[in-house]
Image: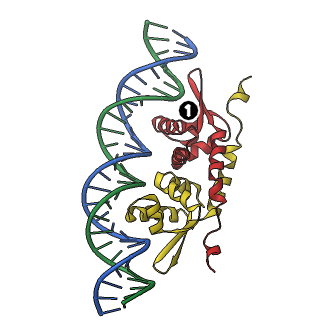
Chain colours: A red, B yellow, C green, D blue
Amino acid sequence: MTPLIALRALGDPLRLQIALVLARGELCVCDLGEHLGVAQSRLSFHLRVLREANLIHSRPDGRWIYYSLNTTAFAELQSFLQPLANSLPPSRERCL
Amino acid sequence: MTPLIALRALGDPLRLQIALVLARGELCVCDLGEHLGVAQSRLSFHLRVLREANLIHSRPDGRWIYYSLNTTAFAELQSFLQPLANSLPPSRERCL
DNA sequence: TGATGTAATCAATCAAACTTGATGAGACGT
DNA sequence: ACGTCTCATCAAGTTTGATTGATTACATCA
């Protein structure tokens, strides 16, 4: 997992929304499109970005493709943020 | 804290680098500039983005301004990711 | 085979973000 | 008051990313 790529992928409103919807279970593109009310082409573009960031999995089934979260990637992102959340407290310890 | 804004702010290579450097302690802009080897104007622009995302604190001292991480914002970002890391496992449970 | 439905890709346009160099605002020392 | 230092801001140019509509690929069903 590359933290920068994952963070950039999640830094788009629609892509973050997609991730939050997929957190409730896997969905095919058409269901996602109905849930979010966006055009198929647009959705496919953002799914590709999320997929290339390794944040989601795709599972073809017949003529549908089901997408789901790659939960381990999100767990890895969490642990990447750990040292930033546990950094030394800001400023106060340095004043006298 | 707004997760989207924070994620977008961290989705830039230089800004993520800034955050990682600041995790080791607060620094003034000039020291950051030396550490990272970037122009002052460019650095100031990205510090502003991080500041507006509430990811860093600034502490003026004389003619210097010291920047440090807002560790609670990173902790909040971590807990925002929690449900995405704990989502139902992908696909396997649905096949038979 | 032909028609339909799902989804990826492409090319073109549009919008947003980044970079650069210059200027401006304050704080400091002489 | 003047020059200098640190940093923020501005405007212009460039680059990158997102949206749209059309096309393509593939699977399904009649």
Q: Name the residue located 52 percent from the left edge and 50 percent from the top edge.
A: A11
Looking at the image, which is closer to me, A3 or D18? A3
Expressed as whole percent of the image width and height from the top left, the position of residue B58 reads 53, 71
Category of crowding for the residue at label 1, using alpha-carbon neighbours closer than 10 angstroms: few (below 14), some (14–19), many (at least 20): some
| Relative height, residue B31 to residue A5 (above, below) | below
Q: Which residue is mark 1?
A: A30
Q: Position of residue D13 (x, y in %)?
A: 25, 55
Q: Secondary structure at mark 1?
A: helix
Q: Position of residue A90 (x, y in %)?
A: 62, 69
- Going by the image, does B89 lie left or right of D13? right
Chain designation of label 1: A
Q: Quadrant of the N terminus of chain B?
A: bottom right
Q: Residue at x 54, y 59 (%)?
A: B21
State whether residue A39 is above or below residue B24.
Answer: above
User: In the visual, does C12 lie left or right of A16?
Assistant: left
| Residue beneath the point at 44% across and 68% down | B30
Name the image quarter holding residue B73: bottom right
Query: Where is residue B14 shown, x and y percent of the image?
Result: 46, 55
Would residue A11 appear left or right of C21 to someone viewing this image?
right
A71 or C30, which lies in front?
C30
Relative to B72, residue D8 above or below: below
Q: Quadrant of the C terminus of chain B?
A: top right
Q: How many marks?
A: 1
Viewer-proximal residue among B11 and D1: D1
Q: Amino acid at mark 1?
A: Cys
